[in-house]
Image (cartoon, rainbow, N blue to C red):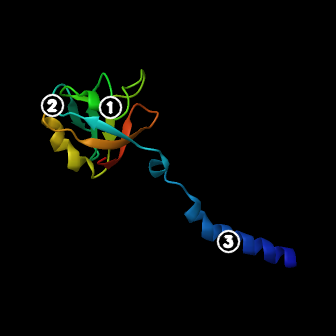
Amino acid sequence: MKAFSHISQMAALVAILSPMLTIDTAHAQQSYPLTCRGGGTLSIQNNGSNGVRINFQAGPGAAPQGLSPGECTWSDRAFRSGEPTTICDSGASAAQYVALLVRSDQYPILQVYNDGHGCMKVTRVGP
């Protein structure tokens, strides 16, 4: 009988703690600053569910080396072969920067991570 009591106590503890132990993978990912220059051949498409897909050209070097219109790059290095050149954002944060991307004099910085499925996912806007 005492063993049953301990088992039921453990089950209750697991039930209480389980919601706290789940990890939101979007927030668990390490994000990195991606600087983009608006304009150029950059294309912005609505994905049909209040999100956007933004296709850009990879800049030839790190952001301090400069960007041409329509290019994005990392703050510390150039893009590597195989890194996605598509930004995917389904959050309300897209409204903060999409309007800037149509102007070649704007350089929004987005915190992103490679989702492994062809997209750079935005976690927040700003440096």
- Mark toward the start of the polypeptide (3 vs 1): 3
The image quadrant of residue 80 is top left
Marks 2,3: beta carbons within 8 A: no
Residue 110 in sight here: yes
Q: What whole-number distance in Å separates the C-alpha atoms at marks 2 and 3? A: 55 Å
Residue 59 at x, y = what percent? Answer: 29, 25
From the image, tell me which residue sits under label 3: 13
Q: Label 1 sits on what residue type?
A: Thr
Q: Position of residue 120 (x, y in %)?
A: 37, 36
The quadrant of the image that shows the N terminus is bottom right
Q: Position of residue 55 (x, y in %)?
A: 27, 30
**Of residues 65 and 101, the one drawn nearer to the viewer in this rendering:** 65
- From the image, state whether disc 3 or disc 1 is nearer to you: 1
Query: Mark 2 is on which residue type?
Result: Gly
Q: Is residue 56 visible?
A: no
Residue 69, disc: none
**SS at mark 2?**
loop
Q: Which residue is mark 1?
A: 86
Q: Secondary structure at mark 1?
A: strand
The residue sitting at 21% across, 33% down in the picture is 37
14 lies above or below 119: below
Type of residue at label 3? Leu
Image position of 82 with respect to 127: above or below = above
> Label 2 crowding class (10 Å Cα cut-off): few <14, some 14-19, many 20+?
some
* Residue in view at x 68 percent, y 73 percent: 12
Q: Given contact means CB atoms under 8 Å apart, are the residues at marks 3 and 1 in contact?
A: no
Q: Which residue is mark 2?
A: 39
Task: Give left or right: position of 104 versus 82.
Answer: left
Q: CA distance from mark 3 to mark 1?
A: 43 Å
